[in-house]
Image (cartoon, rainbow, N blue to C red):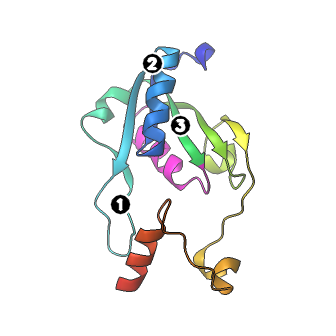
């Protein structure tokens, strides 16, 4: 990334925030992050947005958008949209791990770089073979507990 004149590194909270900070430090760029807006009706979490004046920090800048693990691309895509919405130029997207479910085109970027690809498929809940087999949702990691809580409400 050093040869791409990156001025800002931005990642979604929580996993991408730490990656953005350390990547920015390593390449001599500023780091920022997006975090969740208030959820709209029917949403588990709100959309990732730039807060705390970070929108002004990316305006007119060359931005690398990063995340720790990219599964469906949902979080990193929203972060890319937030940077572009603030008139930042997204130079590339990067991750430590890609789960192989989305590429550069699906993220809407020219370049998508990752250190490791570990292919684990993702499905919509209605098509999930694990759900069909009544495998319990893992509530220890990621958003499993939030998913179950939201599902029990509605």
Q: In the image, which disc is placed on residue 35?
A: none
- Viewed as shown, does residue 75 lie left or right of 110? left
Image location (x, y in percent) of residue 7: 45, 19
Disc 1 residue crowd, few under 14, some 14–19, many 20+, Cα 10 Å: some
Q: CA gap, disc 3 to disc 2?
A: 13 Å
The first of marks 1 and 3 along the sequence is 1
Identify the residue shown where x is 59% and y is 36%.
93
Q: Position of residue 33 (x, y in %)?
A: 38, 38
Q: Secondary structure at mark 1?
A: loop
- Left or right relative to 122: residue 73: left
Can you say whether 40 is above or below 136 in the image?
above
Check contact, mark 1 vs mark 2: CB within 8 A: no
Is the residue under label 2 in contact with that under label 3 (CB below 8 Å)?
no
Q: Is residue 41 magenta?
A: no
Q: Position of residue 67 (x, y in %)?
A: 53, 41
Q: Is residue 154 visible?
A: no
Query: Is residue 9 toward the left or the right of residue 94 in the image?
Result: left
> Which residue is tagged 2?
29
Tell me the magenta residue range: 70-88
Quadrant in which the C terminus is drawn: bottom left
What is the chief secondary structure element of the magenta stretch? helix
Q: Secondary structure at mark 2?
A: loop
Q: Residue at x 31, y 33 (%)?
A: 54
> What is the number of callouts on the image?
3
Q: Eyeballing the image, is 148 above or below 47?
A: below
Asked whether the beta carbons under mark 1 and mark 3 sit within 8 Å of each other, the answer is no
**Residue under numbered circle 1:** 46
Q: Which mark is residue 66?
A: 3
For residue 78: magenta? yes
């Amino acid at each position: 990334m050093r040869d791409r004149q990156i001025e800002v590194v931005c990642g979604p909270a929580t996993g991408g925030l730490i990656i953005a900070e350390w990547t920015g430090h390593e390449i001599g760029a500023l780091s920022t992050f997006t975090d969740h807006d208030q959820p709209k009706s029917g949403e588990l979490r709100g959309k990732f947005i730039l807060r705390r004046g970070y929108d002004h920090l990316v305006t007119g800048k060359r931005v690398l958008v990063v995340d720790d693990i990219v599964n469906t691309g949902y979080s990193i895509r929203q972060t890319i949209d937030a940077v572009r919405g603030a008139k930042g130029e997204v130079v590339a997207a990067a991750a430590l791990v890609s789960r192989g479910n989305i590429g550069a085109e699906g993220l809407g970027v020219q370049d998508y770089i990752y250190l490791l690809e570990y292919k684990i498929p993702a499905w919509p809940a209605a098509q999930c073979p694990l759900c069909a087999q009544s495998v319990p949702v893992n509530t220890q990691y990621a958003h499993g507990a939030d998913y179950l809580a939201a599902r029990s409400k509605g």
